[in-house]
Amino acid sequence: MKPSEKNKHTNFLKEQAQLLGFDFCGISKAEKLSTEEQNLSDWLSKGYHGKMAWMDNHFDKRLNPAELVPGAKSVVSLMYNYYPGNEGSLNPTHRVARYAYGKDYHNVIKEKLRSLLSILRNEIGDFAGRAFVDSAPIMERQWAARSGLGWLGKNTLLLNKERGSYFFLAELVIDLELDYDLPIRDYCGSCTRCIDACPTEAILEGGILDASRCISYLTIELKEAIPDEFKGKTGNWIFGCDICQEVCPWNRFSKAHDEPEFQLTDGIRKLASGAWRDITEEVFNKVFRYSPLKRTKYQGIMRNITFLSTGVNDQERTD
C-alpha cells in the first residue's frame, strides 16, 4: 500500500472513531507480544489469576493477534470514557464500581465497533477484521500502551496523561496496513499511592496485580465464599472497586462522560443506598437485566452485601 494511502486510511479511521464517541484511538503493528510472553507465564504460574481458570486458556492467542485474525496487520486500540463526574447525590452505603453505573459496556461499545468496521469497509473496501470489547483473549492494556494511548500504571491499569484511567478499552484487529503510533514513557515516577491505598494488598511492587486479592475479583469473579482473611478489608464495595483509581493523581484530569447509556440508573442508586438489602431474585433479574451486575448474579450480590455487613458469607450463615 502506498504511504499516502495508508495515511489517508489512518486519518479516516481516527476521525470516524471520534465521531462515534471514542476519546482516543491509537494503532499498533500486529505482531506477537514477545516481551509480554514471559511476564504472562510467570503471572499465571504464581496463581495470581486466582480461580479465573479461563485466564490460563488460549495462551498463544493472548500474545499473537494473527491467531485471532489470520494475516492481521494492525491492532486499533480505542478508549471510551465512563467517568460519571459529580456523584454528590449518590452517597452510597453499598458501593458499585463506576464502570457499572449504566448499561453493560460490552453491548454499547460493541455496537459502535461494528459501526466503525462498516464505515471503514464502505470507504476503503473489504478487509478482514474483528472487534473486541473485553470479550476475547487479547491483552488490551498492553496493546493500548503500545499504541501510545497511555502507560501501564503500578495498579496495572492504563493511565492516560490527559484524562486518567476511567476508560473502557476496545480493539479492532484488522488485516489492513496503517500508520502506527509509538508508545510513551511511564509517568508514575516514585508515586505509590495505589499500592499504599489497596486494603487487600493486591498491588505488588513492579506493576504486578495479585488478582486473587483484588476486591473486584472477590466481589465479581470469585464464585465461592470470600476468604475469611478479607473480613473488614473490602470496605463498602459490593461490586468491583475503584480505590486505586480514586487515589491516582492522574485522575484529577478526568472529565464526565456524555454517553446516555452510561448514566447512573435508578437500580444502582437504590442498591447503593442500602434500600435493596432484601431484594428478591426476580426483581434483581428484571432491574439489572442490561447491567454489568448481572455477571455476578443475584446470589453473588447477596453474598457480597452479607459479607460487607457481617464479614460472613451467605454460605456460612446457612451451615
Image: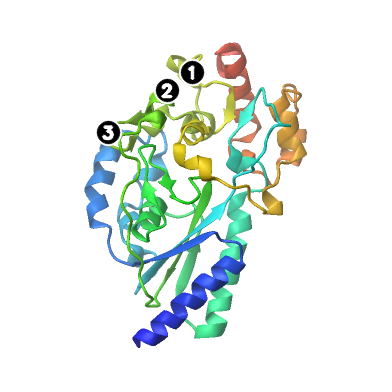
Is 288 left or right of 189, judged from the image as shown? Answer: right
Name which quarter of the figure residue 45 lies in.
top left
Q: Residue at x 70, y 46 (%)?
A: 263
Q: Nearer the viewer, residue 230 or 279?
A: 230
Q: Are marks 3 and 1 in contact (CB under 8 Å)?
A: no
Name which quarter of the figure residue 15 lies in.
bottom right
Q: Quadrant of the N terminus?
A: bottom left
Q: Position of residue 251 (x, y in %)?
A: 50, 41
Q: Earlier in the sequence, mark 2 or mark 3?
A: 3
Is 144 left or right of 63, judged from the image as shown? Answer: right
- Looking at the rendered structure, the secondary structure element under dot 3 is loop
Q: Is residue 215 visible?
A: yes
Q: Are marks 2 and 3 in contact (CB under 8 Å)?
A: no
Q: Are marks 1 and 2 in contact (CB under 8 Å)?
A: yes
Q: Earlier in the sequence, mark 1 or mark 2?
A: 2
- Looking at the rendered structure, the secondary structure element under dot 1 is loop
Q: Residue at x 35, y 85 (%)?
A: 3
Q: Dot 1 corresponds to which residue? A: 233
Q: Dot 3 corresponds to which residue? A: 46
